[in-house]
Image (tube, rainbow, N blue to C red):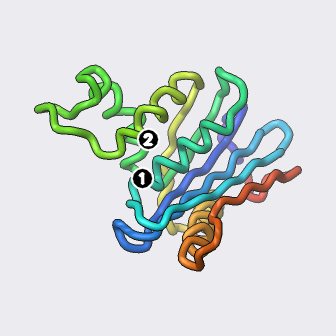
Amino acid sequence: MSDGVQGLLAYTDGGCRGNPGIGGWGFVLVHLASGKTLERRGGEDHTTNNRMEIMAALELLRSLTRPGQKLEIRSDSRYLIDLATKWAPGWKARGWTRKGKAPLKNLDLIKPLDALLAKHQVRWTWVAGHSGEPGNDYVDQLANEAMDCVAAGQDPAAERRLADAPIPL
C-alpha cells in the first residue's frame, strides 16, 4: 500500500563495486492513480557509491516534466536523504561549502539536485536496504544490471515504460 501518498511514488538506488569502482544507479517512478511506471538505469566505470545514490535521485527528478509534482522518494541511502533534507540548505547558505569552508564532494551533482528538489513537493522516506522491501530490491537490481553492463563494456543506460507498477503499492 502507498500509505496515503498521492501523486508519485519513487524508489532510487545506487551502488558501486569497489569505492571508487564500477557504479550503477536506478529508479522506478510510479503514478499512483494509474499505475503507469517509468524505470531507468545508468552507470559509470570509475565512480563512488555516494555519486551513484545522488545520480539516481537526480535522474529521477530530471524525468519529471511538470513542476509542482507531489512525490515520495524512498531510498536506502541515509547520505542522500540527509544531503537533501538537512545538509544542503546550510551548504547553500555558506556558498556551497561546509563549516570551515571545506569544499564539498559531488557538488556538480548536489547543486542540480537541490534546484530540482525546489521545483517539487518531495517527501523522503528511508527504507532498509537488502531487507526484502520489494521497491528497494527492484531498484537495487536495476543498479546491479547497470554495473554488469559497465563491467562488460556495454551501455548501462536503459529505460522502460510500463502500464502497471512492477512493485506492490
Q: Determine the image quadrant of residue 106.
A: top left
**Left or right, residue 46 beside residue 169:** left
Please report contact status of discs 1 and 2: CB closer than 8 Å, yes or no: yes
| Res 51 label | 1
**Kind of residue indicated by mark 1:** Arg
**Left or right, residue 49 beside residue 69:** left
* x and y, in percent, of residue 56 in the image: 55, 50
Mark 2 element type: helix
The residue under the point 68% across, 34% down is: 64
Tell me the residue that label 2 is attached to: 109
- Neighbourhood count class around disc 1 (C-alpha, 10 Å): few under 14, some 14–19, many 20 upward: many
Q: In the depicted view, which residue is nearer to us: 141 or 59?
A: 59
Give the distance between the C-alpha atoms of the residues marked 1 and 2, in whole angstroms. Answer: 8 Å
Mark 1 element type: helix
* x and y, in percent, of residue 11 in the image: 60, 50
Up the image or down, 110 lies above or below 132; here it is: above
User: Can residue 6 be seen here?
Assistant: no
